[in-house]
Image: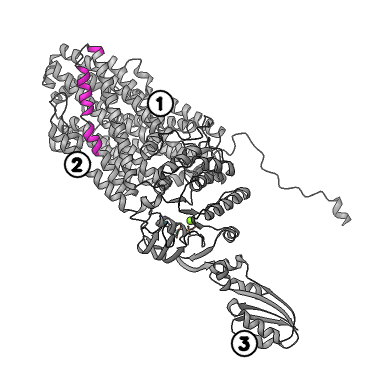
Amino acid sequence: MSAATTLPAPVPAPLPARVSAGAGQLTGTGVLLRAALRRNRRRLVTWVLALGGITVYAAVALGAVYPTAADRQARAAVMETPAGILLSGPGFGTDDYTLGAMIANELGLTVLVAVSIMSISLVVRQTRAEEESGNAELLLAAAVGRRAPLASALALMAIADVAVAVVITAGLAGAGLAAVDAAALAVGFALTGAVFGAVAAVTAQLFVQARAASGSALAVLGAAVLVRGVGDVLHHSGSPLSWLSPIAWAQQTRAFVDLRWEPLGLSVALAAVLAALALRLSARRDVGAGLLTPRRGPAAASGWLAGPVALLARLQRGTVAGWTAAMLLLGLTFGSLTDSVTDMIAGNPRLATVFGGEGAGLTDSFTAAAGLYYGLCAAAFTVGSVLRLRGEETAGRLELLLAGGVDRRRVLGAGLAVACAAAVLLLLVAGLGGGLAAAAVSGRAGAVPDQLGTALVQLPAVLLLGALTAVLVAAVPRRSGLAWVAVCWVALLGMFGPLLQLPGWAARLSPFGWLPRVPAVDVDVAPLAVLLLVAAALGAVALLAFRRRDLSG
Amino acid sequence: MSAGPAVEVRGLIKNFGDVRALDGLDLTVDAGSVAGFLGPNGAGKSTTLRILLGLLRADGGTARLLGGDPWADAVALHRRLAYVPGDVALWPTLTGGEVIDLLGRLRGRADARRRDELLERFDLDPTRKTRAYSKGNRQKVALVAALAADVDLLVLDEPTSGLDPLKEEVFTECIGEARAAGRSVLLSSHVLSEVEKLCDTVTIIRNGRTVESGTLTELRHLTRSTVTADVAADPSGLAALPGVHDLSRDGHRVRFQVDNAHLDTVVAALATLGLDSLVCTPPSLEQLFLQHYGDALPVPDAVGAR
Ligand SMILES: Nc1ncnc2c1ncn2[C@@H]1O[C@H](COP(=O)(O)OP(=O)(O)OP(=O)(O)O)[C@@H](O)[C@H]1O
Ligand SMILES: [Mg+2]
């Protein structure tokens, strides 16, 4: 006993010394990445194959539709119009419009946007969405470093982007195009995706809700698309304004025309800076918290918050405000370009023959094309808005509403009503913005009703997609995400249909294909009425189906 | 109020794919009474309550709620009941006060005085966004919304999960007031002391089937008491009596389990043996439930092993 007292007291095993403040913050990244890959494998494969498939298909189809140099030159003339530039690229190689130049110029923008959306959604899903649902807390309580969730999300995004690049390079090279240029184009796609994924990584640190995180990243993407478009319209092949947009950097490689890799250095640098910033922020903030400290709110609900319509409107007011601003911007952009289209026709008789119309006819078909974009945007909003009902259901909040004495049909009807009312608002704002901008630059007051008309004529097709979404939510809730497939489908048909000169019946596989191209043609009430009837019938089916099923998590 | 029971469920069946969650469940809540609904995890309590709310559709059996059909008459019934779900999910961007008001208005009968009084008693700050609430505070939002409602029936799925002991006390008072006001209450719970304190009747289910129901006294009656006695004569004859189990003796001391239904005959027999002392312990509530929850009957074994 006495001997024991002379022994040194037992020393607990020392904790591993802290090497630096950052040590261990990435622990577990590999495990998280593997889990994320397994969980998202179907999503990844779908994205990669869809993007690769579209690119390769377009390469083959464009080759078939424009077989001769003369055909392609005629096409190039269209692409040099402001509308063409806005919806495609800066127009490299339009003086010798090869198939490669055509793909880079015309397909590039769509794929860039799609890759960016993929990257944004992957990053937000793996970061803020996990935090919002509470899953992240469990993970971080395990031996997982503070930065590991974001690091693994960025790695997942990088893998997806690289896969897209590889598939597109292989596809284009396989279709007989120059491999190095194909690679440059594809790497540009991937790096742009990485840039916007990194933007989402930052917004995911700032906003508490996943919806706000992806929404703001998408808004940055939209702004980049607009800035690039306006910049390129101002000056063929790009003005200094264009270079402010990451979208431009990928297009500025001049793939298939006069290849240069340097612009991609900007993409690498920006993606790296943003990713580093996001990782820093992620290690400094509280789990589950954003940058803004939570504020208090009213102790009692204001009088109008008394039913499902009011509740759903209240829940979506931020989203609707964001979309309204975006649609206004879109309308102003299209509207302000309307005039330069007419100018260009005046100075270029060949263009007029391409369009087979007078200056005014060209302005009208440009306006009609703008209308399609308003419609597609409104449709995307509407689908997302109706799908929120499903979100409320999986979150368990629909249960509170229904147990509170609200009829199921009333809840679904409220969801549809709010979505449709907001869609009308968005179309009105876009049309008004477009009309006022067009009237301001051209001094032609008639531009206002023209733009308003082309915007509002989209409504039946938008409503039909909203009602279709409601049917999915009501009848096959677990598959209701398929509504996005419908949105992609109508967007592809709408944007590529004219490009690929699809036959009329193919265009009519989309509700937008049935719409009269106001103001280029007169309003035809019959197809609008049919679309509205189909929408109403789908709405009725949804109401019936929703009454019959179990609520599910 | 309807004359019959507030809730009457017979032979309820519910399948989720090939999982049979409810397998002929019976449940009755008498009008004006507080009914406890007990069972191990995954027994089917929440499923039953969600069927009673018309959120799920039963695959078989009958369910009547306040005299109506829970699926077909959902909306009309919901105006007469209030519900606290097992997992309370709230709209993160609304404040607690807004959620309470919204739910009250949906039902059509909001009582602002009662709401404020309950906020006070539960010590809940209604100005915080629900995202910023702790788990217990989220639970309180749902509780205040439900208890403030002027309804005939309260359907509560583990209502006190996450509450601190003081708020549990407040909840107990509120249920007492509800009963005094003539409301019926159906309450699922894992807190046995709470059930013992609050409930007039208890239904215990396992694997989607009712294994026991009745008042607590009745349930006690169905189980065994432990008897320890010091007797002068040879007690070995006791083992042959009906209802006696696990008899063990140590000299003059004898120890056994007895079915409560046979208690009187056994005590009479003991008296003839010359009793020196007698201790009869009713089963604790804990034992009572464990006996119904577990596969084995742990009560006799545990005691007999001593
Ligand atoms: N939507 C569903 N889909 C599939 N199975 C389900 C669903 N809801 C419940 N179940 C299953 O039904 C059974 C009963 O679940 P229920 O939630 O009713 O249990 P519970 O008694 O409330 O349990 P706890 O005490 O844990 O709350 C469980 O086996 C559960 O897995
Ligand atoms: Mg439960």
Q: Nearer the viewer, residue B64 or B132?
A: B64
| Mark 2 lies within 8 Å of ligand 1 (Cβ measured) | no
Query: Magenta residues, as a range?
Result: A440-464
Q: Nearer the viewer, residue B135 or B267?
A: B267
The chain letter for the residue carrying disc 1 is A
Main structural element of the magenta stretch: helix, strand or loop?
helix
Labels 3 and 2 in the same subunit: no
The residue identified by callout 3 is B240
Q: Nearer the viewer, mark 1 or mark 2?
A: 2
At numbered mark 3, what does the secondary structure look like: helix, strand or loop? helix
Give the secondary structure at mark 2: helix
Colouring: one colour
> What's the amino acid at mark 1?
Ser
Q: Quadrant of the C terminus of chain B?
A: bottom right
User: In terms of sequence position, does the residue under pointer 1 or pointer 2 come before the other?
Assistant: 1
Q: Would you name the residue on which mark 2 appears?
A: A534
Residue beneath label 1, please?
A267
- In the image, what residue type sits under mark 3? Ala
Coordinates of residue A368 in the picture (x, y in percent)? 19, 25
Quote the CA–CA distance across marks 1 and 3: 91 Å
Name the spot of residue B229 as percent of width and height, x first. Answer: 72, 79
Disc 3 within 8 angstroms of ligand 1 (CB): no
Q: Is residue B149 left or right of residue A258?
A: right
- Going by the image, does B50 lie left or right of A443? right
Crowd band around label 3 with a 10 angstrom C-alpha radius: few (<14), some (14–19), many (20+): few
Q: Is residue B283 left or right of residue A81?
A: right
In the rendered image of this protein, does residue A220 appear above or below residue A126?
A: above
Give the chain letter at badge 3.
B
Q: Is residue A492 magenta?
A: no
Residue B301 appears at what percent x and percent y?
62, 74
